[in-house]
Image (spheres, rainbow, N blue to C red):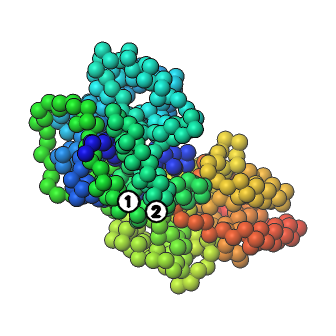
Amino acid sequence: MRTHVLTVALEDYFHADSFRPWIREETWYRFEDRLPKSTQRALDLLDRCGTRATFFVGRSTAQSAPDLVREVANRGHEIACRGDHRCPPAVLGPARFRQHAMQCREQLEEVIGRPVLGFRMAGNRLSRDDLWMLEVLAECGFLYDSSIGPALGAKLLRYYYRHRAQLSHRLFQEVPISALAVFGMEVPIPHSGSLRHLPQTWVRNAIDRWDQKHRSDPYVLHFRTWELDPEQPRISAAPMASRIRHYRNLNRMPALLEQVLGSYRFSTVADYLGLELDRPRPSPQAPAGPVLRSSVAPRPAGLISTQPQRNGAVPPTPVTIVIPCFNESQSLGYLSNTLHSVATSLRDEYAFTFLFVDDGSTDGTWAVLQKLFGERSDCRLIQHERNQGLARTIQTGIRHADTPVVCSMDCDCTYDPHELRRMIPLLTEDVDLVTASPYHPAGAVRNVPRWRLVLSKSLSSLYRLVLRQKLYTYTSCFRVYRREAAVNVSVERGGFFGVTEMLGRLDLQGRRIVEFPATLEGRMLGRSKMKIAPTIAGHLGLLAQFVALRLRPVRPPQETTR
């Protein structure tokens, strides 16, 4: 029986190409770390099938989860470099690409204590103009690359075969993703995506055809570790097509892989090419059993250390952050990681108290809140027996706060709470409210449906005609309040438009409101609770009420000692 090649990308669900346009790398730390669990499943499956594989590992994973990478190597699998830059080689250029490839290899060799021979680009496949990358890899001492993947209608493999004669003197080889010629086009034959999405009869026929037709080249099968994790969180920011591509038939993947691995013989790239690995260098002792180190960044199960670390004598300013929660059990892990980063990075300036208000959730939100935050001295939990709406939930938090400065934020982190570092100082002696403003000329919007933008901007234009202070955004709930100004504001509407009512009533009282240009992002996990028709009707009714209030004489607010 011929031996083919099995490759595995060591990546978590939020690293996936399907979500690359919607999930920025700088936000990876917020997501639940499931790489140890999915990697353990992959290793156990390969053990059951008696198969070894080449695991392509990025530098960031080697840095954040070295024990996990060592566990893979110690289970008999090859470790190779996986590029971390999510852009084509042409954008990197030869100098930056050479530096990136060398740093990745050095990091991996330091972790596993043995040579790293191969490389594969992350996400992108090489184009005809990128073949200089192979020269750079050969010059760096790599012995093979596996970045060439077929694209429909492309003939890159033919260009490569002409080009590789120039590399033969370096003993450098390419192991391209397998493809069959169909009507003159190079069509990829089954890999992990095909296994999950295509009929199994077609899959088996395609593999058999390759096995019979290509006697000198191996069939290269690859999959990603997250494909063995059907319980992973669902990313709602991506469009339907991307979600189908990513999630469809994940529960079938282990059985499908075992069928293929049981029908053919697979091994590592190094074994297939006959490359000899040097004797392993001494490396730190790997712990026995499954390794559960983080794949993104070290972080505790809780929120933060409750004792701020300060170098100066001025104590941090006490601030309460109110976080309304309604059926947000899927988002709370994401929220916990985000708040941990906020509290750690801002602890020298602010001593935060996180006040979570569960607004009558029915999906287990209260139980998750208690598990994540219930035992922490810097967190307080309040529960509404029945749903009262977003605005009244925020008001509950403001009433229970015991600090002069109170912030409110979305549970789904559609605004980056790190911006509180710049927002809170705007609450000066003559300012009572600072509100985030994505529609400000210096603000921005990412991954938000067009209908929502049109609705929100149109409403803001109408409110600008009615209210005294001419703002760009009236609907954001990411705000900084002076508690004494907000605690007694009467709010009749409890839904999304109730948040605008709070701002409007402060405006009509003559309170000063300042906008902060911010970035609004579509929510990553779960579904929006906004219902379009009731929201529009509520805002129109609120606008009419504000018009009536503007026609009445309004007394200025009483002077208070600040």
Q: At x 24% / y 50%, what residue is drawn?
A: 51
- Which comes sooner in the sequence, label 2 or label 1? 2
Rate crowding at label 1 as few (under 14), some (14 to 19) or many (20 or more) other CA atoms within 10 Å: some
- List the single residue furthest toward the front: 212
Residue 271 appears at what percent x and percent y?
22, 36
Dot 1 amino acid type: Leu
Q: Are marks 2 and 1 in contact (CB under 8 Å)?
A: yes
Q: At x 22% / y 44%, what residue is drawn?
A: 77
In terms of image quadrants, where is residue 141? top left
- The residue labelled by disc 2 is 249
In terms of image quadrants, where is residue 231? bottom left
- List the single residue furthest toward the right: 551
* Element carrying mark 1: helix
Quadrant into which the C terminus falls: bottom right
Residue 457 appears at what percent x and percent y?
76, 54
Distance between the alpha carbons at the discs numbered 2 and 1: 10 Å
Q: At x 52% / y 78%, what residue is drawn?
A: 361
* Element carrying mark 2: loop
Dot 2 amino acid type: Asn
Q: At x 38% / y 68%, what residue is drawn?
A: 373
Quadrant into which the N terminus falls: top left
Disc tally is 2
- The residue labelled by disc 1 is 256
390 left or right of 151 in image: right
Residue 389 appears at what percent x and percent y?
62, 75
Which disc is residue 497 wearing? none
For this rendering, which residue is in front, 400 or 140? 140
For this rendering, which residue is in front, 80 or 258? 258
